[in-house]
Image (cartoon, grey):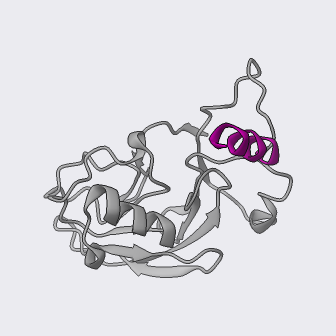
Amino acid sequence: MAPCLTGHVLTKTRISVDWFQVPRTSHLVSHYFCTHVKREHVVGLNEYWKEDIYCSRVTAALLHRFCKIPHSQLHVIPLNKPQVLRYKPDPISQTDSTFRVTAYDANHCQGSVMFLFESECFGSILYTGNFRWYSGITDPLRGLHLDLVYFDGTYSSKHGEFISRSECKTKAVTVVR
């Protein structure tokens, strides 16, 4: 497992997830993905960003509103429906290939997703981003062979205990009232 705290260009790929600081003219990245909108996941995004970004429907709306990314640069990956994308030709090797990406609900915040990337070139890579564990979160991944997992362990410490989502909602309503 590779640690995943502030985004990465995925191993053996030209895919960047939650990492928007790669030089935009770089041949290193073909596709940019965003797991969700929180400050540490969108560093480098603003109205001057010129590359396309793949994300959930909610994340696309938030990127447009808060980072001023034009709708034309935002591409929605629907939940649980694999999408085939074509790599932009590599300027060095001139290779052209495809990969498949599937977004799964990360149960973290509005619009947050995990991405499963699959290709004959690099195998299967799961990028969790931030997620909130629940007993069925891995159901869509059952039976899959994963070659690499980028796991966000931000809250994996045993030192903290977290209340349930329903308790959190109840407390939030109480505070707002």
Residue 78 position by quadrant? bottom right
Asked if one can make out residue 7 in the rendered structure from this viewpoint, the answer is: no
Q: Where is residue 90 in the image (x, y as percent from the top left)?
A: 23, 68
Determine which quarter of the picture holds residue 140. bottom right
Magenta span main SS = helix
Is 50 on the left-hand or right-hand side of 122? left
Compare residues 168 and 95 and report the one nearer the observer: 168
Residue 166 sits inside the magenta stretch: yes
Measuring from the top left, give residue 31's x and y in whole percent.
Answer: 34, 66
Task: Kindly give the residue lying farthest to the top in the view shown.
Answer: 159
Q: Where is residue 67 in the image (x, y as percent from the top left)?
A: 29, 56
Q: How many marks?
A: 0
Left or right of 4, for residue 15:
left
Q: Look at the image and tell me in which quarter the N terminus lies.
A: top right
Q: Is residue 62 above or below residue 39?
A: below
Please state the horizontal and vertical placement of residue 33, each as a whole percent of the image.
Answer: 41, 61
Left or right: 85 in relation to 71? right
Instruction: Locate residue 96 relative to residue 132 in the image: left or right.
Output: left
- In this picture, is 168 found above or below 60? above
Q: Does the magenta stretch include residue 17?
A: no
**Closer-to-camera residue (123/169):** 169
- Residue at image x 16%, y 68%? 91
Q: Quadrant of the C terminus?
A: top right
The magenta-colored residue range is: 165-177
Can you tell which quarter of the image residue 65 is in?
bottom left
Between 118 and 80, the one nearer to me in the picture = 80
| Residue farthest front in this picture | 177
Question: Is residue 64 visible to the viewer in this orientation of the structure?
Answer: yes
Residue found 81% across the figure and 64% down from its top: 139
Which residue occupies 17% across, 50% down? 23
